[in-house]
Structure formats: C-alpha cells, structure tokens
Image (tube, rainbow, N blue to C red):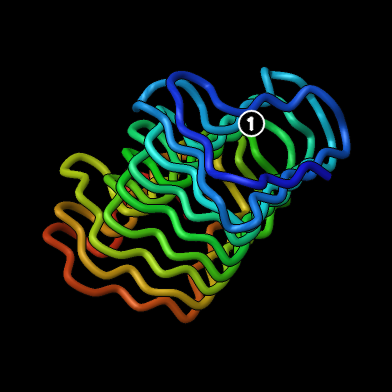
Amino acid sequence: VYTLNQSISGSGTCLVINANDVTIDFAGFSITGDGTGYGVDSQGTAYTNLTLKNGNIISFSMGIHFDGPASSLISNITLGYNSNSGVFAVTGTHNIENSTINYSSTGINFNSVTNSIIRNNVLNSNSVAVSLGALSATNYFYNTSILNCTTTTSGCISLAAASHNNVFELGIINGSNNNLIHVAAAADNLTFKDFQFINSSGNDLYLMGSPA
C-alpha cells in the first residue's frame, strides 16, 4: 500500500504502476496536472489487483489510464477536468464505486472491458458520461447519476457495436444536448431498469438498427 502524505502537482503523467497488487491510498489528497499525460498509468501491462482510493485526480488528459490491467478497483475518487477521459480502460475488469467524474470529454471510457461493477457514482458535466466500446460486455451499472451531458453528436450513454449484455439499474440521466442513450447497430441484450430520463434535447433512446 502506498499512501500519499501531501498533494502533488506537475506536468505530464504523475503516477505509474508497474506491479501487481498495488494499492494507492490518496488519503484525501490530490494529484493535479497541466492538462497533459495521465494521472495514474499502468503502461499497457496486464497487472492484477490494482486499487486507487480516497482522493482527487484533476486536470490531466486522462485521469486514470488502464490500458491492459486485468483487474482494478477505483473507490471514493473524484476525477475532474481531465480533458479526454476520467477513467479509460482497455480489457480486464474494472470496478468503480462511490466516485465522481466531472468535466471530461468522456467520463467512463471502456473498451473490451467485461464483468465490471460500477456502483454509486455521479457523472456530471461530461460530454459523454459512459462510453462502452466494442466487446465491452456483462458490465453492471447500479445507482448511477448522470447530469448535464454536453455532447451534440452522441448520447450521455454511448453503446458501440458488439457491446452486449450490459445492465444499467437504478439511476437518472438529467440533461443532454443530444440523445440520452445512443445505441449502435449490433449492440445487443442491453437492460435499463428503474432509470429516469429527463431533459433531452434529442431522443431519450436512439437505436441505430440495433436488436437491443
């Protein structure tokens, strides 16, 4: 376990993980960038059992960049003003809980991510709140509050072709400059349960020839 004892500011990438079974406890402190690099980066390696908790990741290109890790937990983290993505993950299982993601191009950006539990999170004032790319499957979103999306071309939740068996239960989408949910063709077996849809400038649900 690595525990911060002060906040850190700098340019480029801040923290790099290069081992399995790493926990970073921010202990309430922040890491702040200059709009470039990654707040936390795994360098494209399939590490397992990574944990980030209890702090703030602010003003990077991507707040968390997990391109390759097999498993991670993000808990009680606030991510803000990360220009590309708050959380970007490719492959593996990445659980996110009790966290807030604000003011990013994409709040949660998953590609080929599977079997993840994303619960009790707030995504506010992102262009796209959640993007599930191709082969992102069997992910479970519970109690998700999505507010004030700014996209004009997609949806607050954007589901790509070949994303499937994803579940969204108990949540709210309030405010979008376009569609609330945008589903591409060939995305299938999607479930929305006990969700509120409010204040869309486009469609609540936009299906592009999908069997969803």
Q: Give the residue number, with chain letter if any, for mark 1.
A: 66
Q: Is residue 128 above or below residue 176?
A: above
Q: Is residue 42 above or below residue 176?
A: above
Residue furthest right in the image: 21
Residue at 53% from the left image edge and 58% from the top image edge: 190
Amino acid type, callout 1 = Phe
Camera-side residue: 201 or 3? Answer: 3
Residue at 53% from the left image edge and 22% from the top image edge: 13
- Residue 187 in sight in this render: no
Q: Position of residue 36 (x, y in %)?
A: 39, 21
> If the image is split into quadrants, where does the N terminus sit?
top right
Q: Secondary structure at mark 1?
A: strand
Q: Is residue 39 above or below residue 23?
A: above
Camera-side residue: 158 or 43? Answer: 43
Residue furthest front in the image: 6
Q: Position of residue 108 (x, y in %)?
A: 48, 46
Camera-side residue: 185 or 41? Answer: 41
